[in-house]
Image (spheres, coloured by chain):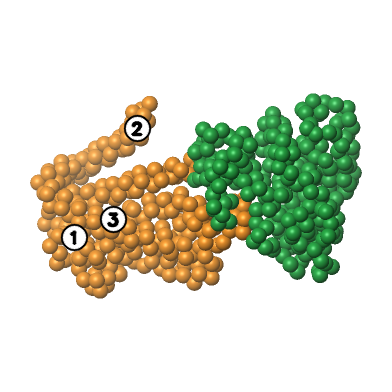
Amino acid sequence: MNEAPLQKTSDAINLKKVVKQFGGQLVLDAVDFAIAPHEFVSLVGPSGCGKSTLLRLIAGLETIDSGSLSLPLIGRQKNPSTQGNQSAQIGETAFVFQESNLLPWLSAFDNVALPFRITGRPVDRDLIESTLDTVGISAAEFAKLPKHLSGGMKMRISIARALVLKPKVLLMDEPFAALDDLLRTQLNEELLRIWAGDKLTIVFVTHNISEAIFMSQRVAVMGADPGRIHDVIPVSFDYPREKSLKSSSDFAKCFARVSQLLEETNR
Amino acid sequence: MNLKKNAGYVLPALGAVVLLLLGWALLKSSSGYPDYILPGPGTVWSAFVDHRMEILRSTWITFLSASGGLSLSVLFGGLTAIVFSQAKWIRRGLYPLAIFLQTVPIVAVAPIIVLWLEEGIVATMFISFIVSLFPIITNTTAGLLNVDNGRYELFRLYRASRFQRLYRLQIPGAMPQFVTGVKIASGMSVLGAVVGEFFCATLQNKGLGRQIFELKDYNVPWMYACILIATFLGVLTFSIVSLIGDRVLLYWDEKKISNI
């Protein structure tokens, strides 16, 4: 398994029998999962099912213990013997945390410029400004410090920072969990718009079933002890999706199905 | 609004000073101690007025020693903290030495330093430096090591080098604690300068410490005036540092501005 050649598949992300342990405790047990390019997939599951860990493994923030994990879309192959990735791929995957994680001493603009500065690339001012504009931050806000911005604005800037290096894969770990429902719905719609426009592949971790169904093409329901993918539900509603979708009976059926699967995993 | 806010700061302090002066005057009149043990506030005030030029000159000398010592501490303490933040084994190896600086009885060591560096402002600055160094090292090191986990991971995600992490994340992140360290050190730098001056006998320009040392035998009210001015100098240095520090920290989280 360790010498597996680069996957010759059309997947964006491919996981085979991925195992992850923390201090002898099995967190992910033989996870098989493939995500297609430009797919929007959500991971839902109870606390401790390893959904965040799965996301962090894909991001390269954690290393797998056995199995293989590859991102053929960006030419990255990972198994326990080839941990870490090449510098050319920096910025090909981006991560949005639950906290905005902005640097409090930098303006909105400079926070979005940070990925350029860390990776030593020339700062593309036009791109930063257009990215900020895409996430709904107006020019009047560019020079403001995070402490003068609302929680929703900070999260928008955090998303702009993730998008600014034009990643192919966007990994999001409960990014809207701290926001109120109204703002969450608004940002869900805006994220879908960005996803459709930028040909992104998005893996979205959330506790919120409605949010997962509304945005995703597939919802992976995970179970705990040990963490595993219990089932994957396709969501076939057409895009662009409107808010009214959530009050349709098909949406309710899908919601009930995912809820039921979540119940099963808890048993 | 601003006036009201300022009054809110100043009035309690002013009230405390007035109470203290009243208590002092009361103690003087009720105890009957002679002036060479406890002069009254009025006597001290007139000693200050009589010798104001000498006192001001001494204050300036002490201020130079203290601010020189503090500047050295800020520079050397900041750099030391950066070195300390780099590895656990460095901290384990050198931290005891830093603690040694804190615990060494400065009054005992000061004469040796004066002997080595010769009597003068260099020696008093050096003593002030030694006394004020420790809080800057400890606070800044703690600040450099106390990095928000999410921000740390953000830097890992973009494969930031150690150096980038240091100057883009750790150093700016440590600013609030660095400022706290300098605030504490500012008061101590005056203390160090005064102690150092005790042992500089042949100076033409006498600092407050030397004046206090010499005056105790023949002009106690004047000595009290010097002690009060030395205290005031400590408060002044602290205030200047706080003013600059808080201005710098305006760029940081509001909640992180210390409310000392």
Q: Which chain carries label 2?
A: B
The residue that mark 1 highlights is B210
Residue A111 visible in image: no
Comparing labels 2 and 3, the label whose residue is closer to the camera: 3
Badge 1 marks a residue whose secondary structure is helix
Comparing labels 1 and 3, the label whose residue is closer to the camera: 3
Can you say which quadrant of the picture contains the C terminus of chain B? Answer: top left
The residue that mark 3 highlights is B67
Quick one: label 2 or label 3, which is nearer the N terminus? 2
Quick one: label 1 or label 3, which is nearer the N terminus? 3
Quadrant in the rendering for residue B7: top left
Quick one: label 1 or label 2, which is nearer the N terminus? 2
Left or right, residue B146 beside residue B10:
right
Q: Mark 1 lies on which chain?
A: B
Rounded to the nearest angstrom, the CA distance separating label 1 from label 2 is 36 Å
Which residue is painted at 88% across and 30% down in the image? A250
Residue B241 circle label: none
Badge 2 marks a residue whose secondary structure is helix
Badge 3 marks a residue whose secondary structure is helix
Say if mark 1 contacts mark 2, CB within 8 Å: no
Which residue is painted at 69% across and 34% down in the image? A190
The residue that mark 2 highlights is B6
Q: Nearer the viewer, residue A50 or A195?
A: A195
Quadrant in the rendering for residue B61: bottom left
Name the colour assigned to chain A in the rendering: green
**Type of the residue with mark 1:** Arg
* Colour-to-chain, orange: B
Q: Nearer the viewer, residue A47 or B44?
A: A47
Q: Which chain carries label 3?
A: B
Q: Where is residue A73 in the image (x, y as percent from the top left)?
A: 76, 54
